[in-house]
Image (spheres, coloured by chain):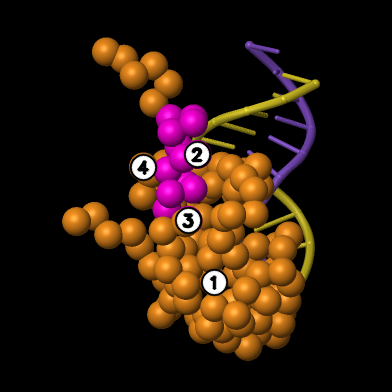
Chain colours: A orange, B purple, C yellow
Amino acid sequence: MAESTPSRAEFAENVLEIVQAIPPGRVMTYDDIAAVLGSRASRMVGQVMSRSGGDLPWWRVIRAGGHPPLCHDAEALEHYEAEGTPLLPSAVEAGYRIDYRTSRWTPPFD
DNA sequence: ACCTTGACCACAA
DNA sequence: CTTGTGGCCAAGG
C-alpha cells in the first residue's frame, strides 16, 4: 500500500510543526528533531527551515552540544536574550553557548 | 546514474 | 582548542 513517498513534504511539515511548538526559553537540536521524525536527516531540518519564512523560531533550533546555528549565531543571540534562554559563556563560537542541559525540550506525546 | 551542495554529527589526532 | 575524515539524508544539476 503504499504511501508512495513516506515523507518529503510531510517531513518538512513535521519539522515546522515541532519548531513552532517549541516554547520560549527552550531549544531543540537538529538531530533531536530528525530523531522524533524517525530520521537522521539533521541536515534536512536546516534545509527546510532555510526555505521557510520568518514565522519560524529557527533560533530555538540549535546544533548538537548546544552550539547555535553557524550561519546566524549573531541573530540568534538577540532572540535568546529576548526570550530569556539560558546561555553559558564560551571561549569560542560566537562567545556564547546554549545551556543545552536545562533548556533542551521535546514535544509531548500525550 | 554520477557529482556537488547543504542552517549537520561524531570521532580521532 | 584546532583540523581532518567519514557518515548521514535529500534535493538539484
Mark carried by residue A38: 4
Residue at the (24%, 55%) spot, across then down? A109
Tell whether label 3 touches label 4 (CB within 8 Å).
Answer: no
Q: Quadrant of residue A88?
A: bottom right
- Marks 4 & 3 on one chain: yes
Tell whether label 1 touches label 3 (CB within 8 Å).
Answer: no
Check disc 1 and give the amino acid type. Answer: Gly
Of the two numbered discs 2 and 1 on the same chain, state the one appearing first in sequence: 2
Of the two numbered discs 4 and 1 on the same chain, state the one appearing first in sequence: 4
Q: Nearer the viewer, mark 3 or mark 1?
A: 3
Q: Which residue is mark 2?
A: A12
Magenta residues, start to end: A7-19
Of the two numbered discs 4 and 2 on the same chain, state the one appearing first in sequence: 2
Residue at the (59%, 65%) spot, across then down? A59
| Residue A16 visible within the image | yes
Q: Element under label 1?
A: helix
Check disc 3 and give the amino acid type. Answer: Val
Q: Was residue A14 drawn as part of the magenta stretch in this picture?
A: yes
Of the two numbered discs 4 and 3 on the same chain, state the one appearing first in sequence: 3
Q: Which residue is mark 3?
A: A19
Residue at the (65%, 62%) spot, across then down? A69
Mark 4 to mark 1: distance in Å?
21 Å
Mark 4 to mark 3: distance in Å?
16 Å
Specify the quadrant that holds the N terminus of chain A. top left
Q: Which residue is mark 1?
A: A66
Of the two numbered discs 2 and 3 on the same chain, state the one appearing first in sequence: 2
